[in-house]
Amino acid sequence: MADLDDLREGSDFGLDKEVAGQSFYLKGCDHLDWGLKDRLSRIFRKASGKTVMLAFDHGFLMGPTSGLERIDLNILPLAEHADCLMATRGIIRASVPPTYNKPVCLRSDAGTTILTDMNDNVVIDVQDAVKLNASAMAIMLAIGDPKMEAKTVANLVHTADLGQKYGIPVMGVTAVGKDMARDARYFSLASRVCAENGANIVKTYYCEGFSNVVASCPVPIVIAGGKKLPESEALELAYNAVNEGAAGVDMGRNVFQSDDPVAMIQAVSGVVHDGLTPPQAFEKFEDLKGQ
């Protein structure tokens, strides 16, 4: 085991240097099997190397929260504008028509509505992910939580093993509990632990010093939207993250709780794929409202 008494915080992240020796268009994916690359290329557009994921897996812990009361009414109109849908297997089967042909990042760990016991249960059967033609499996990781860290790391390692066996990428989702720091040091640690344990994608939060978080993670990072923000602020969040190295966003509440969700997801896509500035993206949002 590494000697923890002389750990020195990283400082040389090579922010001015491109990833060395990369041929496949996604960071850290050159040596993956064909099936893994194929599924990743469904999620991330080759032209931009980025993705706009639409997260609506909240109900597996929170039930029918605002904006998710009716998936058929609230989410399906947004699906055509997303690059990938992140949801649970129950919602995918019950509410998303297979004719949509959208890649799915499948919420693959079970939890309870008591958040302190989250992921105390099981990971879904990987064969169910295969049956759903999942393009990725999402697993929560709670670094620094004495009750949850060991369980969630075990879930991630187990799922990464199965992902390699069946050719399905794994997205490690970094949790942030009420007692956890929301800073670059924590997110760098959590993101790196995800990658070191086999995650092919990491979902984490934007923070000050985010470019260091991205540089120190050897696989693509997408940012979580987090709590609902005013549309202009959410677009600025997406812009800052992408310009500091994020490979896209996985937004939920900042899209489906927007004043105009369809306009908002198109504005977010403009930031991620077309390089719109926050003012340009907000103007696009305003122009599309009510259409």
Image (spheres, grey):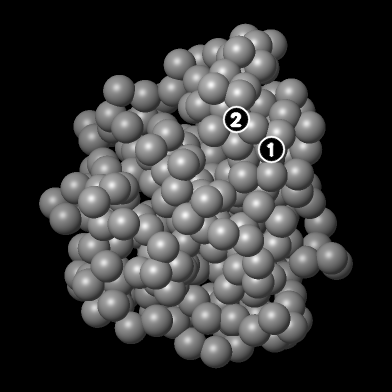
Q: Is residue 105 visible?
A: yes
Residue ID for mark 2: 264
Q: Is residue 213 above or below residue 96?
A: above
Q: Residue at x 47, y 55 (%)?
A: 72
Q: Is residue 212 visible?
A: no
Label number found at residue 258: 1
**Quarter containing the C terminus:** top right
Residue 265 as seen in the image, left or right of residue 11: left
Q: Nearer the viewer, residue 191 or 114?
A: 114
Q: Are marks 1 and 2 in contact (CB under 8 Å)?
A: yes
Q: Assign a secondary structure to mark 1.
A: loop
Label number found at residue 268: none
Q: Amino acid at mark 2?
A: Met
Percent position of residue 120, x then y: 60, 88
Q: Is residue 217 above or below residue 7?
A: above
Q: Residue at x 41, y 63 (%)?
A: 95
Q: Assign a secondary structure to mark 2.
A: helix
